[in-house]
Structures are given as C-alpha cells and as structure tokens.
Amino acid sequence: MGSVPSTPLKSGNARPQDTAEFLIGTFVGEESFPISSDYWQKLLELPQNLHWPSHRVLQACQLFAQNNQCTRHLAKFLIHLSWCLQDCISASGAPSDVYDKAVNAVYITSVFLKHLIENAKSNDIEDLYLSLDENEPIPKDLIQDESIEDLIIHRVLSFISSVAVSPNTYLLHLELLNFMLIAMSTQLLCGPSPGPKDVNPFIDAAMVQDSSLVSLVVCKLLLNYISQPGMPFKSASYSIFYEGNQPSVLQRVGSAAANFVLLPLSYLGNSKGEYSKSPLADCSLLVLLVLIHYHKCVVSNDSKTDKSVDSATSDSLLKENTYFSDNHYCKALENAKDVEFDRIDVEGNAHSGPVVRLPFASLFDTLGMCLADEAAVLLLYSLLQGNSDFLEYVLVRTDSDTLLMPLLEALYNAPWRTPNQIYMLLIILLILSQDSSFNASIHKLILPGVPWYKERLLQQTSLGSLMVIILIRTVQYNLSKLRDVYLHTTCLATLANMAPHVHRLSSYASQRVVSLFFMLSRKYNKLVELRDNKVILGKGNSINSLSEDVSAELHIYTDFLRLVLEILNAILTYALPRNPEVVYAIMHRQEVFQPFKNHPRFNELLENIYTVLDFFNSRMDAQSMDGEWSVEKVLQVIILNCRSWRGEGMKMFTQLRFTYEQESHPEEFFIPYVWKLVLSRRVLSFNSGAINLFPVDPPMEKKENDGEVSSKSRNDELSMHGLLLDP
C-alpha cells in the first residue's frame, strides 16, 4: 500500500487483502488509469472487512499527494462517486451492493481529500487538481463548463435531500455528511476575516445550487435533526461496523489513520466520552450550521486594482471594493414556515422560490431536549434571530420552560462553558425578553423545584424569578472571572426589558437584584479609589495612560449602576403593588444606596427609591409593635400598604427597551465559531498547524468538567457585539 505495486494479482486464488493492496496501491501510485477503466469498479467493490495500520495509511496519503497531479485520480474518483450516487438516487429500493459501492467511494475519497486539504500549502487548493487531464475524454454526463466540484456537490446534496433515511441508506447518508464537512474544511485554511482571495471550491459549489435543491437540503437536514434517527446496529447490512472481532471497512482506513483521518467510530461518542444517540442528527446539524453561516467575499465588477501598487496596498484596495454574496441556505432557514399553518401567507409576504416547511412543534421539542449541546444553542439562536415565524411560535408557546430551563441550566454552569457559548445563551434570552407577553408569562409559570440549583433550595419559584437569579449570577461570575463588558451589558439589558413586567418576584430573586447594585458599587468604588491614587502619584506618560484606562472603565461601571437603578425604578414604577418582596429587599439593604444619593448621574433615580422607602418606613413607624419585628411581620405591613400605594411623588422615566441586531458582517464571528464547534465534537480531526481561521493554543478545545474556563482563554474567543438601545 505504501508503494506502487509492480504487477496486478491475476490469480483467482488471490487473498482479498492482497487484492486490496494492489487496488489501493494503484490508486495512490504513479500510473494514471483512464476514467473508463474497469479498475475503478474493482476499487469500489473492495471487501468491507479489511484493515491497515496507521503508518501504512499515512504512507498511502503522502504518496497520493505526490502523484495526484499527474494521475488526477481524485478528480476521476469524484466522478465515479457521483455516478454511484446517481445510481442510488435513480434506483428506488436499490440492492445493498449499490449502496456499499457508494459508501466505499465516499469514504476512500474523504480520507485522501482530507489529507490533501490539511497539507495544502497555505490556501493553495490547486493542490487538489479537481480537473481531468486535457487528453482525458470528458464523461458524457459532465455538462460543458461544469466543474467536478459542482458535479459532486450537486449529486451529494441531491442524494441527501431526496433519498429517505433507512437501515440500507443510513451509513451512506452519514458518510456523505462527513464528506461535506471534509470538503468544506478548506475554510480552516483561510484567515479569520473572509477575503476575496479565499478559495473554497466545494462550499462555493454548494452556494450556487438551485434554490429548490437548497430548500430541500435545509428541510432534510432539519428533519434529520428533529427525528434523531439512531444507528441501526442490528441490521444485516451493517456488519460493516462490527462482526465479532473482525475489523470493518470504516476501521480499515478510518481508525487506522489515527489522528489525521476522520474516525467514523467516533460518531458513537462525543467530546464528553458519552454515546451519541443519533450520529446522523449530529452531523446533519453541523453541516447545516456550516452552510447557513458561510458568506463568500466577492470583488465588485467595477473594482480595478492598479498593478503598480505594492501587494499590501493592493490587498487593502481589493478588500474595500468587496461585498458578501447572498447565502440561499440562510435565506431558506429564515423563510421556513410551520407545516401546521395554511400555505397561503395571510400577511401577503411574498417569498420567491420554494419555502421550507417544518413541524415547528417537533423542532421546538427537539431543541428543548438538546440545548445542553452548544451546536443546538447556535441553531436556536439562528432560528430566533433570523426566522420571525419561529420566534413568534416560541413566544406564544405556554410551556416556555421547555426551552428556558436548559438555557438557564447551561448559564448556571457558566464556569464550564466557553465565553462564546455564554454570550450566545444570553443573546437568546435578550431576544426573547424583547416581547412583553413573554416577560409577563414567565412569571405565571411556577416551577415546583429546580434540582440543578445547588446554592439554595428553590421551591415554587416562578420561571421569571429563576431567570432573574441566573442572570444576576452570570453577572457575578463575569465580574470575577471573565470581565467581559458585553456580557454585563447583555445581562443588564435583558433584566431591563423584564423589569416593567415583573410579577411576584421571589424573595431570593428580589434580594439578588439589590445585591447586584451592591456588587457593582463595590467595583465602582475600587475604580474611583484607583483613579484618585493615579492622579496623586504623578503625571508620567504610563501613569496618564493607565489613568485613562481606569477612567474609561469607571465610566462603564457608572452606566451599569445607573442601569440597575433603572431596573429597580421600572419595577417600583410599573409593578410595585405586585412585588412586595422587592420593597422588602430595598428596605432591608437601604444603606447601599446612601453613598450615591447625591451623585449627579444617580440622584434622580434614587429620589424615586427614597420616595418608596419614605412611604413604607413611615407606615412601619406608625405601627405599634409588641416585641421585635420579624420578617413575616414586616412583609405583612408591606403587603397591606402596597394596596394603598398610588405612586405619588414618583418621577416617570422613559421605559428602556433593548433590542439585539446582528452586526453588518456576522460571518467574521460565526464562521470561526462554527468550525470550532465542528472540531470540538471530534467528528473531524484536523492538523492544528494548518488552521488559519482562528488562533489555536493547545489544548484547542475546552473540555467539560476539567475545571473553570480561565480568563486567559479569552485570547481564543471571538467577538460579536450587536446590542442596540431602542429609546
């Protein structure tokens, strides 16, 4: 296998292993076989129970990389793969050997294609040689000017979208999704910001497919995810995986290829070492995420580059005259409709082309079960942010705990989440909090218990109270560990959206709101002290620079404190009679507000808080009391006087409303983020030295349960900020 065989084995008694050695050796060797040769059929019919050690597989890949330029065997084998897939599509209920040939073709292709991609010189995908030699007759079904990558991607997507998943077809579906991930992994070689010189032949081919096929693919990938089809181990046609101790066709190249070839058996386990219930669903989701978040950077037609300028200037000018092409997969997802609704758009919103129709109820339930998975969180974000119909569906569901509970649990476990994942979770909550009916409904849903919350026993707590508790807990974690301003802002923005609609906030949640002000005030006071010390020390350049940094951070925390006061004001102004526990919490910790009473940024807001304090303190003083005040007795007086509260003397402030919008170029965040997810799932290993899409520091991924994510891991994290204030 590691060298070119001198003669083929013609003996009828040749061992299968020897025959395979010859066929694979010929594939990677120097001799070029024409596309019409019988050799290709023999290669496709290899037995599915052979095995080679890893060093032999590596030798074969290296030899293939040397000879493919002359033999063009990759291009030829891709064409044969397309023919195999066409046979599978055309023949309804095709015999298993047809699918076996296709599995062989796609798997062998994937192994060698992956080696070529991750060992390409920088972004030189020309090393793939995806074309036939000039002397090679063009196959009759290859349309004039159609590239081989267009042909194979069209056939792969056609199979995925049109052939039902069954015991006979499951493995082929799985391997084709694998192939898509490998073929699209050329993005890993590109820089973090998409540029016009990036070369991604396979995903670019996927982007130009007909809109009807695109819609079918998006629909099928989502239906795979919804149905979560399991691996049919007991099917006779799947002896390919296990037959006693006998190695399988997937083991023979896959697991043998150690850490540079995709390991199909790793489909059976995720990064936690747990078994995946549906590898097909997992891969369908990853392929969908890669497709919907890709945007090709294109040079405008009227752009001309002066050849006399240097390379750096030329690249800069080129970037200025570029735009991002539309992504039809993203559009298909954004325009997807619920199958339960009538096909006529009652609002008259016309959508050109076919529309993806999905069972929103099943999608909602599946997401609720899978939100512990970061990829599922990204799918939910993509749907809520882009698809107004699905967002509306989620908002009108009465069982909002189906989605919220796993989201809040994931935030509760923030120390074991990446900052990117925490940010995505918070953005989802912010998007939901933009709806007033959602904010009202979550306070009406009472949870009998929250078993995963360990610090305190939470019983008969509203979902809204739990959301307040978790958001404030996230601020506390961010304050001590991550120190990310945008996480603070997003948490506080969500709380501000919720504040006017708060109803019977629990005692613990009310205490946490006041504690939030105290927590931020301590940080504020430390910054004031630090700033004042720097001013006293002197006026050196480094001192001045540091003082400016402190002043900037002080300004940020001044805004945070004001926002918390706005949140308290919104509760007291619009919902005081319904929230006696909030009044009690403010009265119990009223001393925390005193140092800021005369602060020019806070005094107006604090006037309202002191109006409430004066009202209820006077009512307390008017009560004749035998013995000491207990919590119950204080609350009883508060509840009684809440009924007579009329809000006299309260100043009305404009109600804050925060909304979220993506930045103009979200691909700079999402493309690297999606590929980090793909690699973290261990369904695709990749040479870390070849990755240019994002910085790689070993270990590249954060493992669950290995301790907290340290603040230094922020160096590898990505930035996506899109918070807007709607006055």
Image (spheres, rainbow, N blue to C red):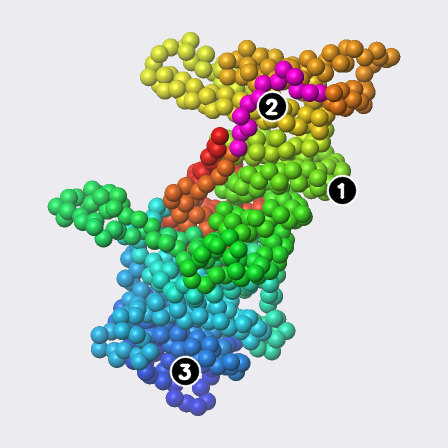
Residue 683 % position (x, y): 50, 59
453 left or right of 718?
A: right
What amino acid type is highlighted by mark number 2? Asn
Please give the label number shown on residue 42: 3
Name which of mark 3 and mark 1 comes first in the sequence. Answer: 3
Q: Nearer the viewer, mark 2 or mark 3?
A: 2
Relative vertical location of residue 568 with respect to residue 155 in this rendering, above or below: above
Q: Name the residue under label 2.
A: 569
**Which residue lies under the disc numbered 1?**
448
Residue found 44% across the figure and 42% down from its top: 662
N-term-proximal mark, 2 vs 1: 1
The answer to which of marks 2 and 3 sits earlier in the sequence is: 3
Q: Residue furthest bottom?
A: 12
Q: What separation in Å lies between label 3 and label 1 (alpha carbons)?
A: 64 Å
- In terms of secondary structure, where does tag 3 sit? helix
The residues colored magenta run: 645-657
Report the number of discs: 3
Q: What residue type is labelled 1?
A: Pro
On screen, residue 553 above or below 456: above
Q: In which quarter of the image is the N terminus?
A: bottom left
